[in-house]
Image (cartoon, rainbow, N blue to C red):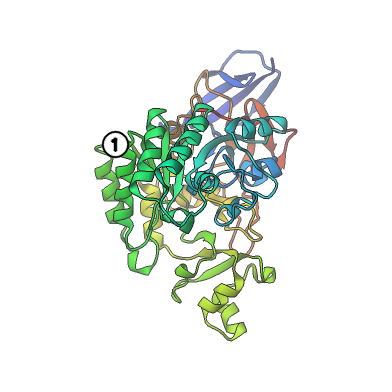
């Protein structure tokens, strides 16, 4: 069994505890010992003085469902120190996807060559060509609707709800981490309380999580949060709110209200949230998000691909039309919407409940820089430079807290017996390089990444075949 000894590390264990000096001994795929001046034999010994060793980061909010199959090297995530991705967010998952043309918003996943009726089928595909990172999967509510229903613009009938519940139950029995919903999207917006509570009761019966892209992140955000929390409580399920934001100029500053509501709700139920460290979001091109005030950067257009990377206002001016008409001409497509304010972003990032998730869209022609930069930006810009929180707190938000919320046992922490998912980083120079103009830029400061006891990334390059695993609840 292969062994590795890391000497003289600054160890940050993922629990939020202060950093300390220690040696780390890895045996096979597990951490075998942590201590001062370990006297053990090892096949490989590295003196890493000056570097921080941390648990592999867990990206709790991804749309990497197809990407881990299409591009198993996963360099955008691996180069940031991410060793585990949670797929199936916002109600969108590859399981149980059987429709030949699932349409929007499932096209965010670029599902064209992939169809998986059961979670075990997806897990088997991952096992046949393992990705560089571990994968945990949520089941998407919109995917369930697209599989069972003929008309997604209506609430589900009792029979349709029962059919979705049976599919969900089967996936949870096969190890899905929980259910996600995206009531923000038109194809799920019609779902009523009866439909959602019936599904979340299945989630609660398995001790799984309910993750929500809430119905509104704009003017009606408090009611949308309450709806999601009530649904989770009725089903006895843990609740996680996706990419917490207050979107649109009328709502800037309202994170004071939303975070206060989260705190109140946490007194009665299990509550969490994730956030990305940017003031722009990214999703499909949508007419209702074009207000003539915020900047909108086109990331993808199926009708005018040459417009990717240009701002909607500039395109509209060049075409001699208004932004709404230009948006319609560019659809279907995607965009970055500069709809948040920096003080709100900082407030959510700093809150003790918040985990870090990139919410990157890997198939966009010019993706939001969060795909390549999220974790380095938290560690470098917000922790080291802005001193919004300490390095141990930052790492806890992207490792130990995340593993706890999603029930990932022996992940997200450095302790004897835990899986050897490790990151070696230089906390003094870590920096995100991805920008809106040049989004596919690798960050600096991640020296090495280990996944399940094998080096997966070193000195800017992927190492060998993937050793990631499918993580069942």
Query: How far across and down, in percent of the image, does residue 209 sit?
Result: 42, 36
Element class at badge 1 = loop
Query: How far across and down, in percent of the image, does residue 288 sit?
Result: 45, 68
Picture quadrant where residue 313 is located: bottom right
Q: Residue sitting at 35 percent across and 41 percent down?
A: 197
Determine whether 120 is above or below 242 in the image. Answer: above
Q: Nearer the viewer, residue 343 or 53?
A: 343
Name the residue that disc number 1 marks: 269
Picture quadrant where residue 472 is located: top right
Residue 11 can be seen in this image: no
Q: Residue sitting at 52 percent across and 59 percent down?
A: 282
Q: Residue furthest bottom?
A: 320
Residue 116 can be seen in this image: yes
Q: Residue furthest right?
A: 464
Q: How many marks?
A: 1
Determine whether 210 is above or below 369 in the image. Answer: above
Q: Nearer the viewer, residue 56 or 446?
A: 56
Query: How far across and down, in percent of the image, does residue 139 sit?
Result: 51, 39
Q: Nearer the viewer, residue 6 or 273?
A: 273
Q: Residue sitting at 73 percent across and 35 percent down?
A: 463
User: Left or right: 260 with respect to 403?
Assistant: left
Determine whether 402 is above or below 311 in the image. Answer: above
Q: Classify 10 Å Cα crowding around label 1: few (below 14), some (14-19), many (20 and above).
A: some
User: Left or right: 72 with respect to 290?
Assistant: right
Q: Residue sitting at 70 percent across and 46 percent down?
A: 113
- Quadrant where the N terminus sits is top right
Determine whether 155 is above or below 86 in the image. Answer: below
Query: How far across and down, in percent of the image, does residue 55 sit?
Result: 53, 32
């Amino acid at each position: 069994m292969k062994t590795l000894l890391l000497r003289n590390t600054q160890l940050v264990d993922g629990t939020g505890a202060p950093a300390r000096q220690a040696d780390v001994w890895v045996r096979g795929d597990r951490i075998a010992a942590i201590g001062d001046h370990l006297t053990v034999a090892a096949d490989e010994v590295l003196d890493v003085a000056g570097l921080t060793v941390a648990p592999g980061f867990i990206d709790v909010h991804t749309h990497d469902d197809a990407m881990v199959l299409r591009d198993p090297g996963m360099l955008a995530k691996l180069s940031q120190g991410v060793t585990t991705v949670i797929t199936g967010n916002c109600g969108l998952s590859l399981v149980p996807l059987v429709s030949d043309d699932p349409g929007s918003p499932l096209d965010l996943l670029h599902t064209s060559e992939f169809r998986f009726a059961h979670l075990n089928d997806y897990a088997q595909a991952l096992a046949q060509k393992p990705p560089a990172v571990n994968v945990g999967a949520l089941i998407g509510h919109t995917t369930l609707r697209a599989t069972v229903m003929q008309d997604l613009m209506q609430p589900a009938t009792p029979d349709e709800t029962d059919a979705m519940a049976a599919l969900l139950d089967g996936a949870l029995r096969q190890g899905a981490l929980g259910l996600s919903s995206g009531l923000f999207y038109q194809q799920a917006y019609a779902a009523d309380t009866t439909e959602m509570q019936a599904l979340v009761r299945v989630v609660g019966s398995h001790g799984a999580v309910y993750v929500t892209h809430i119905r509104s992140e704009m003017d009606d955000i408090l009611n949308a949060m309450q709806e999601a929390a009530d649904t989770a409580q009725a089903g006895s399920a843990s609740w996680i709110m996706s990419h917490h934001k207050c979107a649109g100029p009328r709502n800037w500053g309202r994170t004071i209200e939303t975070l206060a509501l989260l705190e109140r709700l946490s007194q009665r139920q299990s509550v969490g949230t994730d956030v990305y460290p940017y003031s722009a979001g990214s999703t499909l091109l949508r007419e209702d998000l074009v207000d003539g005030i915020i900047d909108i950067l086109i990331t993808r257009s199926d009708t005018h691909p040459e417009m990717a990377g240009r701002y909607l206002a500039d395109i509209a001016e060049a075409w001699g039309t208004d932004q709404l008409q230009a948006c319609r001409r560019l659809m279907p497509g995607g965009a970055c919407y500069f709809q948040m304010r920096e003080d709100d972003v900082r407030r959510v990032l700093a809150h003790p409940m918040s985990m870090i998730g990139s919410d990157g869209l890997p198939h966009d022609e010019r993706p939001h820089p969060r795909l390549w930069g999220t974790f380095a930006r938290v560690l470098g810009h917000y922790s080291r430079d802005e001193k919004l929180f300490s390095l141990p707190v930052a790492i806890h938000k992207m490792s130990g807290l995340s593993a706890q919320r999603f029930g990932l046992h022996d992940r997200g922490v450095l302790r004897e017996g835990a899986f050897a998912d490790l990151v070696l980083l230089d906390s003094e120079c870590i920096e995100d390089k991805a920008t809106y103009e040049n989004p596919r830029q690798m960050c600096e400061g991640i020296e090495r990444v280990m996944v399940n006891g094998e080096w997966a990334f070193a000195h800017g390059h992927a190492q060998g075949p993937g050793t990631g695993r499918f993580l069942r609840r």
